[in-house]
Image: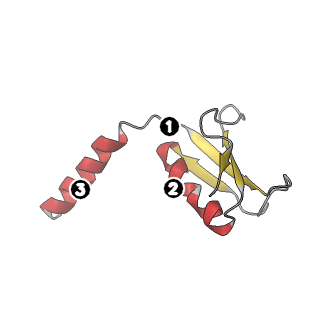
Amino acid sequence: MPKRLTLLIASGALLSGCLTMSGNYEIQAYDQDGKQLDPNIVWYAEGRHVYTVRNAPCMSHPDATLITIDLETGEQHPSESPHRCR
């Protein structure tokens, strides 16, 4: 593996340690009327990847509201939900 790639991977691993999101999440998208968008599509994210995963529904539905549900507790993540796409 090239040294640059190894350094890039190591740097990413070190920087990701600063983020506090952990656990497994389901992300649900709703329109302005509270109707669930894309009910046949399920978005799952692990830990800090929740930020990346929620980009998909926001790109498809720029005015959506996203709910991030902690799969362990079944409750919304208090600091990440609801999230308004813009």
Name which residue lies at 71% across and 34% down: 75
The residue at which mark 1 appears reads as 21
Residue 12 appears at what percent x and percent y?
30, 49
Kind of element beneath mark 2: helix
Query: Of label 2 and label 1, which has the lower sequence position?
Result: 1
Left-right relation of 6 to 86: left
How far is disc 2 from disc 1 in space, using C-alphas?
12 Å
Mark 3: amino acid: Leu
| Of pointers 1 and 3, the one earlier in the residue sequence | 3
- When asked about the image quadrant of residue 56, the answer is bottom right
Quickly name the residue at label 3: 8
Q: Bin the neighbour count of mark 2 within 10 Å (Cα to Cα): few under 14, some 14-19, many 20 and up.
A: few
Residue located 86% across and 55% down the image: 33
> How many angstroms separate mark 3 from mark 2 (CA)?
19 Å
Specify the quadrant that holds the C terminus.
bottom right
Q: Earlier in the sequence, mark 3 or mark 2?
A: 3
Rendered location of residue 67, percent (x, y): 70, 46
Q: Which residue is mark 2?
A: 52
Q: How is the image coloured?
A: secondary structure
Disc 1 is placed on an element classified as: loop
From the top left corner, tell me how far across and down residue 9 is, in percent: 26, 54
